[in-house]
Image (cartoon, grey):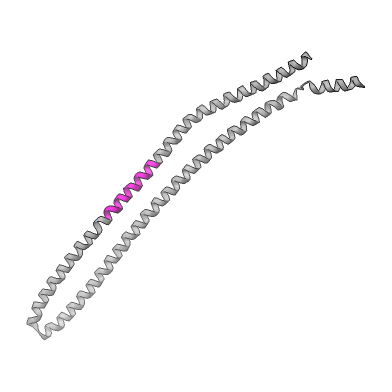
Amino acid sequence: MAQKKSEAVEEKMIPTAEEPKNEGLFVDTLWNQYEQSLERARKLRDNREDAYMNALREVIKFNKQYRKSLGNLFEQTKKTNQEVFSGLMQQINARREEMMKEEVQEEAEIVNEREELKHQLKEVGQQLENLALTPIKSVFQIIDQLEDNFEKSTEANIAYSRERRNAWQLVTNEYVKMARSVHGEIVDRGKNSVKELLKSK
C-alpha cells in the first residue's frame, strides 16, 4: 500500500505532456494581453486626438458663424438706419413742399440749405460707417487667419506625432516579440531544470 502511494506521488511529480502547453499558454496569454492593452492605449490616444481636432473644428466653425451673424446684424442695422434717414428726408421734403407754396422765396434758400445738409449728413454717415467698419473687419480677418493657422498647425502636429509614434511602434512591436520569445525560453529552461532535478532524485 505504501508502494502504491509512492508510485502515485511519483506520477504526480513527473510532468505530463499537457503541462508544457499550459505553461506556454500562460506565456502566450500574458503577452497577448499586454499587446492588446498596448493596442487599446494606441487607439484611445488616436481617438482622443481625433476628438480634439473635431472639437477644435467645431469651435472655429461656430466662431466664424458668430462673426458672420454680427456682420449681418450690422448690415441690418445699416439698412434700418438708411430707411429711417429716407423717411426723415421724405418728411423734410413734404414739409418743404408745403412751405414752398406759402413762401416760395424763403423756401428756396431753405431747400438749398436742406439739400446741402442732406448731402453733408450722407457723407458724414458714410465716413462714420467706414471708420466703424475698418477696425471690425480687420479684427475679424485677423481672427479668421489665426484660427485657420491654429487649425493647420494642430493638424500638422498631430500628423507628425502619429508618424513618430508609428515609427516607434514598429520598434516596440519587435521588442515585445523578443521579450515574448525570451520569456518562453526562460519558462522552457525552468521546466527542463525541474525535469532534470526530478530525474536526479
Quarter of the picture holding the C terminus: top right
Pick the residue in front: 3 or 159. Answer: 3
Residue at the far left in the pictured view: 105
- Residue 151 in the image: above or below residue 164: below
Where does the image place residue 93, in percent across and percent down from the top left?
Answer: 17, 77
- Give me the residue at 29% from left, 63% from top: 75
Q: What is the span of residues highlighted in magenta in the rendered image?
A: 137-154
Quarter of the picture holding the N terminus: top right
User: Is 163 situated left or right of 74 in this image?
Assistant: right
Where does the image place residue 125, in percent across and percent down from the top left?
Answer: 20, 65
Q: Main secondary structure of the magenta part?
A: helix
- Give me the residue at 32% from left, 50% from top: 143
- Give me the residue at 33% from left, 60% from top: 70
- Give me the residue at 10% from left, 80% from top: 107
Q: Residue 177: name its quadrant.
A: top right
Asked whether residue 111 is drawn in magenta, I would say: no
Where does the image place residue 3, in percent across and percent down from the top left?
Answer: 90, 19
Residue at the far bottom in the pictured view: 102
